[in-house]
């Protein structure tokens, strides 16, 4: 039996689930007084401002109720309206009857877990769209990365519980984006089903082509789609010829699946006014009375807006919403790709990490709007000095990163100096400055974690040196 906020007693299920995740076991069972304190912290009446904010439903699976109280206080301190439920271990978490209704799961991770296998089991038992944040003690960055690869969304050290709101915010944002993407995919499936059902409808472009793909006849909907004033003018344009001239595309276009549906082909056509349109083509053969093929009938669907929506969602998933730079996950993917390429070619590359100096003081003195503008000014400077092959990213908070392929240490320091000067002398508001560290692969690190750590150490060494110099002045 256990106590949880707004939840009654819960019976445990089968023996297999009682054995689940021994590594997540409770070190010490909470006392009744601690449970009551956690309940008071999480269920106190909301003030007017909190009532207006969306409530975040979080379930904590942790035996240290004082840590749960601190976690809830940290979340509320930065503006979250929290509806917290508390259970004592991971078994009670996966057996919770209302686990589908929570936004976040925060779970204790025991140091005796073997290679993160328990995390994988827990992630499998939890609802698919419930982010799992682990509260950990004394584990390395490599171990944290391993846990995230096995299903955890993020790891937060208990001695740095102030980082929990950042992890929760990221988890909620990604959960929201995933739901938006799922809705878009459902909409796309609906549109495809509608397309098949209305294939003969005149709102779709329909044309008949000869065996070389030249238009023989077109309907009025295709004229409107391609913005041609007359049928005669469109018949003189060979838009489908390249598709039918390619045996692979022609075979795909005319091939049929087991259910009898054609396999559409996507292409890019040019309208009368020179603009481009993305179209999905489906076709069937037209046979003569003697059974010989002499033409194709093609249905044309305008999918330009659908592809724009997909591109927009991909950009959202890979970019920082404030600065427009790549986000942390995109940067890690780019680093991993660059390491593989460097291993093939033997060419080194550099990673620059930037940290804005005294951003908090800037926010306190001029307001958060000015602070956000300062972040964007820094991002603009990075973009200005980027080549097409470089990756500029917001690493997190007031930290930025710049990935420079095929760039050695000397050239990387030169780029860092130019960027620092540009930021300091942009003249667009209160003066700002950055500290920068450089890491070179493979000299400073032979994997993502060690390279980032080397650049981070160099950056903070520069920051300490500046503080020392300023103190001596």
Image: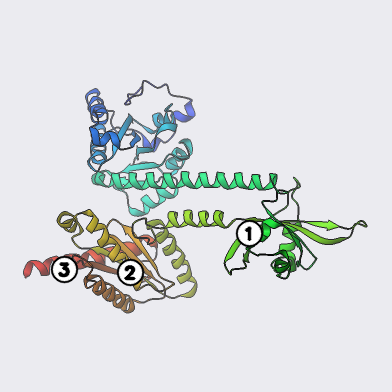
Question: Which residue, given by chain and number where applicable, does mark 2 sit on?
Answer: 382
Q: Secondary structure at mark 2?
A: helix
Looking at the image, which is closer to me, 376 or 274?
Answer: 274
Which residue: 46% across, 40% down?
Answer: 129
Q: Residue at x 28, y 56 (%)?
A: 397
- Residue 370 percent coordinates (x, y): 22, 58
Left or right of 239 on screen, residue 412 = left
Residue assigned mark 3: 465
Q: Earlier in the sequence, mark 3 or mark 1?
A: 1
Is 76 placed above or below 163 here?
Answer: above
Which of the marked residues, 2 or 3, is nearer the chain's N terminus?
2
Q: Which residue carries the number 1 mark?
A: 225
Q: Quadrant of residue 369?
A: bottom left
Q: Is residue 87 left or right of residue 221?
A: left
Disc 2 to disc 3: CB gap under 8 Å: no
How many angstroms separate mark 2 from mark 3 (CA)?
23 Å
Q: Residues within 10 Å of mark 2 (few under 14, many from 20)?
A: many
The answer to whether residue 281 is seen in the rendering is no
């Amino acid at each position: 039996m256990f106590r949880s906020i707004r939840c009654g007693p819960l019976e445990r299920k089968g023996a297999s689930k009682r054995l689940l995740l021994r590594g997540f076991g409770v070190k010490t069972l909470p006392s009744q007084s601690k449970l009551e304190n956690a309940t008071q912290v999480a269920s106190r009446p909301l003030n007017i401002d909190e009532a207006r904010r969306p409530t975040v439903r979080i379930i904590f699976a942790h035996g240290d109720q004082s840590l749960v109280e601190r976690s809830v206080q940290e979340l509320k301190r930065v503006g979250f309206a929290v509806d917290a439920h508390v259970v004592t271990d991971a078994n009670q978490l996966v057996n919770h009857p209302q686990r589908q209704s929570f936004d976040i799961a925060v779970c204790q991770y025991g140091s005796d877990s073997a290679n993160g296998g328990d995390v994988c089991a827990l992630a499998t038992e939890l609802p698919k769209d419930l982010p799992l944040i682990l509260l950990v003690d004394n584990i390395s960055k490599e171990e944290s990365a391993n846990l995230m690869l096995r299903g955890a969304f993020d790891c937060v050290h208990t001695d740095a519980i102030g980082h929990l709101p950042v992890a929760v915010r990221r988890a909620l944002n990604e959960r929201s984006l995933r739901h938006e993407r799922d809705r878009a995919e459902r909409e796309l499936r609906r549109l495809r089903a509608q397309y098949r059902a209305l294939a003969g409808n005149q709102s779709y472009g329909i044309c008949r082509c000869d065996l070389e793909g030249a238009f023989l006849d077109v309907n009025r909907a295709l004229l409107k789609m391609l913005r041609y004033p007359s049928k005669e003018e469109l018949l003189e344009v060979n838009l489908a010829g390249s598709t039918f001239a390619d045996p692979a595309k022609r075979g795909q276009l005319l091939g049929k699946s087991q259910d009898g549906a054609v396999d559409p082909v996507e292409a890019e056509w040019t309208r009368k006014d020179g603009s481009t349109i993305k179209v999905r083509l489906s076709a069937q053969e037209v046979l003569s009375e003697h059974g010989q093929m002499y033409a194709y009938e093609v249905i044309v669907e305008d999918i330009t807006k659908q592809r724009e929506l997909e591109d927009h969602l991909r950009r959202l998933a890979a970019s920082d919403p404030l600065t427009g730079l790549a986000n942390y996950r995109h940067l890690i993917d780019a680093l991993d790709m660059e390491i593989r390429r460097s291993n093939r070619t033997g060419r080194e590359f550099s990673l620059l990490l930037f940290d804005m100096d005294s951003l908090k003081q800037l926010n306190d003195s001029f307001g958060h709007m000015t602070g956000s503008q300062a972040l964007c000014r820094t991002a603009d400077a990075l973009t200005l000095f980027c080549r097409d092959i470089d990756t500029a990213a917001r690493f997190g908070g007031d930290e930025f990163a710049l990935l420079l392929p095929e760039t050695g240490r000397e050239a990387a320091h030169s780029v860092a100096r130019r960027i620092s000067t540009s930021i300091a002398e942009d003249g667009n508001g209160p003066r700002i400055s950055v500290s920068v560290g450089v890491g070179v692969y493979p000299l400073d690190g032979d994997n993502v974690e060690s390279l980032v750590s080397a650049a981070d150490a160099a950056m903070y060494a520069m920051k300490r040196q500046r503080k020392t110099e300023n103190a001596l002045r």
